[in-house]
Amino acid sequence: MSFRYVDLFAGIGGFHAALTAMGGTCVYAVEIDPKAAFIYKKNWGLDPLGDITAHISKGKTFVPKHDVLVAGFPCQPFSKSGEQKGMDEIRGTLYWNILQIVRSHKPAVILLENVRNLAGPRHRSEWRVIIDTLRTEKYRVCDLPTIFSPHLLSPTKGGRPQVRERVFIAAVRDSSRNANLVAERPITLNGPQKSWDPRNWNLEEHLPLEDDPRFLNCNLSEREILWINAWDDFVTSIRKNQKGLRLPGFPLWADDWRQLSRLRIPSSTPEWKAEILRKNSTFYTEHQPLLDEWTEKWGVYSESFPRSRRKLEWQAQDTATLWETVMQLRPSGIRAKQATYLPALVAITQTSIIGTRKRRLSPREAARLQGFPDWFDFGDQSTSATYKQLGNSVNIGVVWHVFIELVKQNKELLNRIAPNIVRAVELAPVNPDKALGQLRKKLGQE
């Protein structure tokens, strides 16, 4: 008999993919975003559209009985890209809806996912509340967070070339007398697996990148090509004229290039910003003729260049040119990294640019980056909607890995209270990609 699970704040079904491929049966899913819910239903045959708060009323829950509860609960209250109001914001209180379901059904396993910042210094009180309330409900949970990223897993274990640190709160119910509810260690250790070096990621081989040039809305605009060509010329010119000079590791802000003798920093300026201003001024003073020629050649101070495109964050070390890097067009500037693993997919317009292909990551490639199989169907929705949904999704390989390690770590306890979960994990392959291939056949038969 398979284990039963509920999928809260389900998105397009990252948790669903992992747990169903592992042999679980989803008995309830809920997702408030109608576009995401449509894609969920299209692929999994279950309509999750609804508001979880409407399914819980006056101390009662209409959620079915289940063995496992998973939830990628809303991250905006804790994300660095938001205002970080935590549980003071209404979305932050949705944790209490999760807790009410836990109190009603007492599932054997709970696995919650959120952004890395939930375990950061600004949210210590929220973290403590979550841990303490779970222990009050007789769950064994660690004080330390489980933090993991798909780029730390090898391709043979379902890893992906994406730096995407996420926090998992993993809990197992233990209602026995004198139970020790303090788990000794996080489910997965920080750092790469012993057999895998993340520097070995190769996008062409491991993602892989598509060769077909017919991408919908993935090509760069003329203005974007202009900005990148200009900064590419900057990179090559600096290296050509200053042999042996490494590009600065601090952000380059062309709007703040002035002679040191003319630098004036207001006293109210934060020290981190003041330091960047001093470094930019020093850099300009040392290379003024070259920089003046470059800004004039490309019209850097014209209307063609918004302020955010007059900034470069070079994090690509000795990569020869900008077009050989992976880039993001961010509000803080053009960020360039080595073309090994990619920055995290986000739910806003910062989809990575693959320099060697002179285009953005395609929706299918972005789906692969999150572990979704190529048969996963996004229908005819807009590219931007697909990017947003993938940016909000959990990574399937990481969920697979963390869930398996959670069950292994608590095997003795789970054998007593939910042996069906243990059996499912013992039968699961190391790599979820294989199980997802088999799942497609199963879904096609039903």
Image (tube, rainbow, N blue to C red):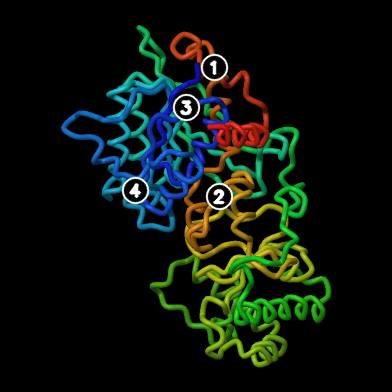
Secondary structure of the residue carrying tag 4 is loop
- The image's mark for residue 377 is 2
Residue 224, given in percent of the width and then of the height, sits at: 61, 77
What is the spatial separation of the Cα atoms under label 2 and label 3, in whole angstroms? 20 Å
What is the spatial separation of the Cα atoms under label 2 and label 1, in whole angstroms? 31 Å
Q: Residues within 10 Å of mark 2 (few under 14, many from 20)?
A: few
Sequence-wise, the earlier of marks 2 and 4 is 4
Secondary structure of the residue carrying tag 3 is strand
**Tag 1 residue:** 422
Sequence-wise, the earlier of marks 3 and 1 is 3
- Label 4 is placed on what type of residue? Ile
- The residue under the point 37% across, 41% down is 124
| View extreme (front): residue | 445
The mark closer to the camera, 4 or 3, is 3
* Residue 401 makes an appearance in the image: no
What is the spatial separation of the Cα atoms under label 2 and label 4, in whole angstroms? 20 Å
